[in-house]
């Protein structure tokens, strides 16, 4: 179907990203997967391209563009190439919205130069060893010092994308105890410098997929954080998080769409070139029917994603519709990638083929940004159930 989310500027950006990935990423990607992270040179290169500044307001040196279509282009081109660009999307589409909405002008002027250049990479730390989707259950504490100049942070976070390599981590802390009447109060955002004494990466996690995107467990032991590094008001973080979850789920859906579309591309290429019984696998009716069914699902997802992107651009995408999109997108991606892997036969199970890596990479999309069970709860609530 014809798409209307892209203009000439987005297609020009697509070509730039395609060339960058072919030149700077693909040749070294197997080494990055073995290392469990991308080199810092990748982020610096993306910074030089202006990727990290697209959504930054002009007053702070950015392009001042509203970037959902640009982000979708990056997702599509990286999936098309069978690679992951580290934790770039966490940096630009999870952390940046909080800074734009709640940081002070002084903080933005201080942080944005490094943010845009890739010299200061960031992560978002919410999840804790005993707290997943229940954000109100966060226990990492931040106690204000007696002289009011800094907070002292103690606790742990886990499953933090980009946390191993991050220079600053936007961390959700509890600055006052939860009460029976208000479990959601008392949470505060602190932008913690990872060179601070008492901060450490407990370990880099060994994941099923997304091996070139580092994920870590973090430890905070009496970490001193200047009051000037608090983002927004004390005790208001839960409300901030709720606002930005819509964008996070839109981004997750965009990634899932790109993965599903890439899977079809990989399957088409393989089945056209692979012979069985003296003819290409693509010529068999089962192959045609499977790919046709996958194509129909991905086209439906594309239409839903493009509509949601437009609604987001006008501020009309609400939490329930974002949940519907995230649920549908990730379930479709899971089905499509699995069916396209099946068409590869035994080779689909070999990591040298991009479909195998994509299979492992896609699975987590039904878990992060709020599990799909949580999405169903949100949707049901919006239906009055």
Image (tube, grey):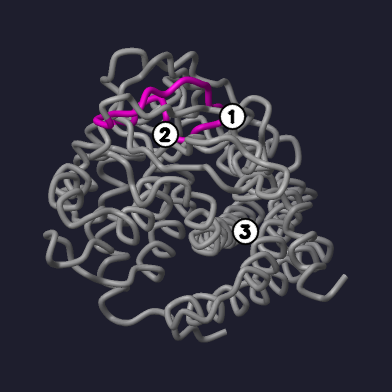
**Count of marks overlaid on the render:** 3
Q: Residue at x 40, y 24 (%)?
A: 164
- Work out which residue is located at the far right of the displayed protein and give it: 385
Please tell me whether residue 133 is drawn above or below residue 152 in the rendered image: below
Closer to the observer: label 3 or label 2?
A: 2
Q: Are the residues at dot 3 and dot 1 in contact (C-beta closer than 8 Å)?
A: no
Residue 262 appears in the figure: no
- Helix, strand or loop at mark 2: loop
Horizontal side of residue 219 vs 49, given as left or right: right
Closer to the observer: label 3 or label 1?
A: 1
User: Residue 129: where, in percent of width, then height?
Assistant: 64, 25
**Residue 260 numbered mark, or none:** 3
Q: Earlier in the sequence, mark 2 or mark 1?
A: 1
Please tell me whether residue 352 is drawn above or below residue 287 in the rendered image: above
Q: Residue at x 65, y 73 (%)?
A: 321
Q: Residues within 10 Å of mark 1 (few under 14, many from 20)?
A: many
Looking at the rendered image, the quarter that the C terminus falls into is bottom right
User: Residue 182: where, in percent of width, then height?
Assistant: 66, 49
Horizontal side of residue 322 vs 349, given as left or right: left
Q: Residue at x 32, y 48 (%)?
A: 21
| Residues rendered magenta in the picture | 148-167
**Residue 162 numbered mark, or none:** 2
Which SS does the magenta portion mostly show? strand
Query: For residue 17, what is the image quadrant?
Result: bottom left
Closer to the observer: label 2 or label 1?
A: 1
Q: Residues within 10 Å of mark 2 (few under 14, many from 20)?
A: many
- Helix, strand or loop at mark 1: loop
Horizontal side of residue 120 vs 289, given as left or right: left
User: Residue 104: where, in percent of width, then height?
Assistant: 23, 55
């Amino acid at each position: 179907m014809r798409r209307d989310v892209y203009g000439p500027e987005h297609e020009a950006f697509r070509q730039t990203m395609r060339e960058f990935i072919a030149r700077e990423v693909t040749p070294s990607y197997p080494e990055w997967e073995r290392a469990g992270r991308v080199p810092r040179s990748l982020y610096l290169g993306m910074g030089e391209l202006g990727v990290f500044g697209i959504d930054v307001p002009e007053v702070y040196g950015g392009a001042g563009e509203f970037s959902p279509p640009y982000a979708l282009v990056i997702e599509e081109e990286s999936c098309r190439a069978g690679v992951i660009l580290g934790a770039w999307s966490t940096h630009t589409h999870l952390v940046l919205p909080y800074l734009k909405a709640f940081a002070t002008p002084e903080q933005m002027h201080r942080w944005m130069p490094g943010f845009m250049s890739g010299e200061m990479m960031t992560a978002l730390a919410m999840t804790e060893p005993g707290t997943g989707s229940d954000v109100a259950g966060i226990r990492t504490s931040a106690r204000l010092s007696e002289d009011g100049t800094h907070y002292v942070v103690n606790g742990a976070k886990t499953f933090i994308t980009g946390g191993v390599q991050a220079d600053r981590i936007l961390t959700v802390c509890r600055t006052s105890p939860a009460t029976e009447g208000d479990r959601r109060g008392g949470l505060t955002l602190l932008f913690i410098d990872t060179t601070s004494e008492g901060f450490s990466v407990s370990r880099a996690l060994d994941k099923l997929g997304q091996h070139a995107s580092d994920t870590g467990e973090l430890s905070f032991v009496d970490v001193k954080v200047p009051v000037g590094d608090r983002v927004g008001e004390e005790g208001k973080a839960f409300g901030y998080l709720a606002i930005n979850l819509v964008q996070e789920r839109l981004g997750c859906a965009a990634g899932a769409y790109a993965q599903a579309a890439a899977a079809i591309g990989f399957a088409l290429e393989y089945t056209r070139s692979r012979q069985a019984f003296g003819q290409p696998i693509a010529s068999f009716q089962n192959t045609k029917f499977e790919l046709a069914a996958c194509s129909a699902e991905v086209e439906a997802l594309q239409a839903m994603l493009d509509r949601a992107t437009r609604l987001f651009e006008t501020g009309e995408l609400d939490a329930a519709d974002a949940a519907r999109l995230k649920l549908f997108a990730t379930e479709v991606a899971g089905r499509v990638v699995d069916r396209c892997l099946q068409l590869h036969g035994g080779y689909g199970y070999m990591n040298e083929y991009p479909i195998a890596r994509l299979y492992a990479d896609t699975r987590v999309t039904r878990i992060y940004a709020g599990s799909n069970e949580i999405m169903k709860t949100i949707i049901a609530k919006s239906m009055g159930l």
